[in-house]
Image: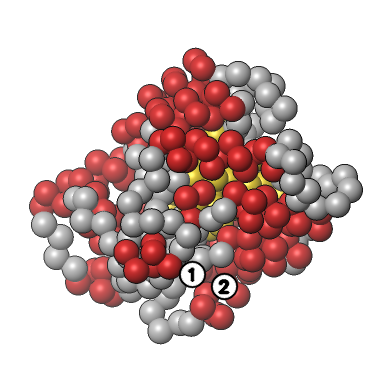
Amino acid sequence: MGIPLSALELAIVEDGRAATEVLASTVAVTGKLEELGYHRVWIAEHHGSPAIATSSPPVLAAHLAAVTSSIRVGSGGVMAPNHAPLAIAEQFATLSALNPGRIDLGVGRGPGTFDEKIIRALRRGADPATDDEYRADVAELLGHLAGESGIRVLPGEVPTPQPWLLCSSAAGASLAAELGLPIAAAHHIRPQHTAEVLQAYRANFKPSRWREKPYVILCVETICADTDAEAAQLAGPCAVIKSSLLKGEGGDLAFPTPEQAAAHEMAPESAELVAQFTAVQAHGGPEKVVRSLKDLAAATGADELMLTTPVYDSAARARSYELVAESI
């Protein structure tokens, strides 16, 4: 296919396992990604979640960078409303100084949590950041990274981390275009917005110090196994969570075991929503998954594919990444 493959890792919590074990598994999966030739691995920001153990992307990224040597490492993403822009700039500039040429700073505006108590414990208020507040945070962050804010982030010449904007709407894509940033399009969250996101981004892109031309990572939910049936079984736990999210119920839910997922009775309307979502992602055996990924790349003109593989077992997750890499 001739397109780079990358991964978005979530550090999914298996039943009865502590963060110590979960994060160790994430480290092992990252080592496998590097061995398979994946271009980059990003870590998402989630707070207080029983299902995901990635509350601090810069700390986890620092460790992943330290135990690898070639794969790019970064955030997918840091939630800008949760942190002071200078703090983000200092963290990722330090990472870049320690790992020159390997650090990505993906920034988004999602909540990172649905718990009001946690939201208040972070720097933000209870209400979502407005468009103007988000725009101001991103602009301030870029000013710090570019050395244009009047504040010394680190002494001397330090390699700058590559900034990215995570986009699931035309508004976010337009902001990325205005600032001349590369984007990661969240097809794995809101596939119904993908075409609009890419059109807004490419039509309005302005060259900048960060990119001369538009660059699109397309993030795709990808669950690959030796057979279509096995992949469907692996997707069961995520489907249970997805059924609640697609109905707009929100909330951070525990990731069910495969046995719990198999016993779960899903309402017909929920099952239909999940099936519609899955149809535009990449689930199945190697042949089916590769065909789906190729079709998505061709339809969107993506420069890079980022696979996110929300399966319960980390060994199965690593195997999915392996099957895709070998098949493509």
Residue 101 visible: no
Q: CA distance from mark 2 to mark 1?
A: 7 Å
Q: Which mark is residue 23?
A: 2
Which residue is at 54% across, 42% downward?
137
Where is residue 289 shown, x and y percent of the image?
A: 44, 43
Residue 201 visible: yes
Where is residue 221 shown, x and y percent of the image?
A: 42, 48
Give the mark, 2 or 1, whose residue is nearer the N terminus: 2
Residue that extends furthest to the front in the rendered view of this protein: 150
Q: Which mark is residue 53?
A: 1
Q: Nearer the viewer, residue 55 or 127?
A: 127
Which three-letter amino acid code belongs to the residue tagged 1?
Answer: Ala
Disc 2, SS: helix
Quadrant assignment for the C terminus: top right
Residue that extends furthest to the top in the rendered view of this protein: 203
Which residue is at 60% across, 49% downward?
85
Q: Nearer the viewer, residue 64 or 2?
A: 64
